[in-house]
Amino acid sequence: MVIPKIDHRETSYSLAAFEATYRFITGQPPRAGLVRQTEVVLNGKLVGLGLDPMDAGSGNFVNNLPLRGARMEIFATDASTGQRQGSAVHAQTTGDDGQWGPFRGRGDTAYEFVIQAAGYATTHIYRSPLPRSSPWLNMRPERANDADRAAQAVLSFTRPRGYFDPGRDSMSLDGQSSLPGVPPGAGVASSRLRLTDSTHRSVVASFNGEKIVGLTWPMAQGHTTVLELSD
């Protein structure tokens, strides 16, 4: 089975790959599409970087090890601006297992996930509304490097379940159709903006119809922003 124009990650994670796999196993197509839930229960682990996730000098590679003693706060947001809608709807400090939930929310609401951990930047993760419950919503705070610290604000646009391909995909970030650090072809899954503007403002990202809006936060105070795609 060859599915045109899908990349390495989409071979596992895309809707087209799921439909082909389901048809191969069962001999028939899936009976229904995505069934949305009004109320969702979300959970997962906070994971770190390096040989020791608590030691900033042990490397910056992903290790999938639980991050102990990290703080997770969740805020409902206005999906069109990224602004918070009230106080935190969930707050928890992780134990030895790194679990940050469970959190009971709504499938039609966008959330901001804020992670604070020693040795990491305070990471503000914005996502589209999550339509179904999941116990595997693992997240990771980011570390700031020297180039990040020279900026007023830093924002990453990430696609964990696929790559960016300028020749195939319709995408934009903060009004730019050319994403920084994304070359021709499907080879990278993250774009990074280092902003000289200190204004606390909304940033819009879009990818093939999925739109995420988040806020910039001051790098001088140790904050960074991540806009994470579901597609």
Image: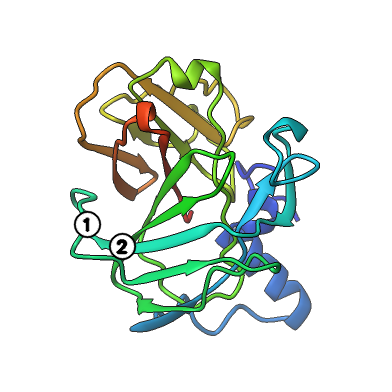
Relative side of 84 to 191, left or right: left
Relative side of 167 to 45, left or right: left
Q: Quadrant of the N terminus?
A: bottom right
Image position, residue 144 (x, y; %): 53, 29
- Residue at numbered disc 1: 84
Image height check: is 81 above or below 187? Answer: below
Whether residue 37 is visible here, answered yes or no, is no
* Element marked by disc 1: loop
* Element marked by disc 2: strand
Q: In front: 101, or 222?
A: 222
What crowding class fits label 1: few (fewer than 14 Cα within 10 Å), some (14-19), or many (20 or more)?
A: some
Relative side of 47 to 41, left or right: right
Image height check: is 62 above or below 27? Answer: above
- Name the residue located 38 percent from the left edge and 35 percent from the top edge: 171
Image height check: is 153 above or below 21? Answer: above
Image position, residue 85 (x, y; %): 18, 62
**Disc 2 residue type (three-letter):** Phe
Q: In front: 23, or 112?
A: 112
Q: Which mark is residue 115?
A: none
Q: How is the image coloured?
A: rainbow
Image position, residue 200 (x, y; %): 21, 34
Q: Which mark is residue 75?
A: 2
Q: Are marks 2 and 1 in contact (CB under 8 Å)?
A: yes
Quadrant of the rendered image containing residue 114:
bottom left
**Disc 1 residue type (three-letter):** Arg
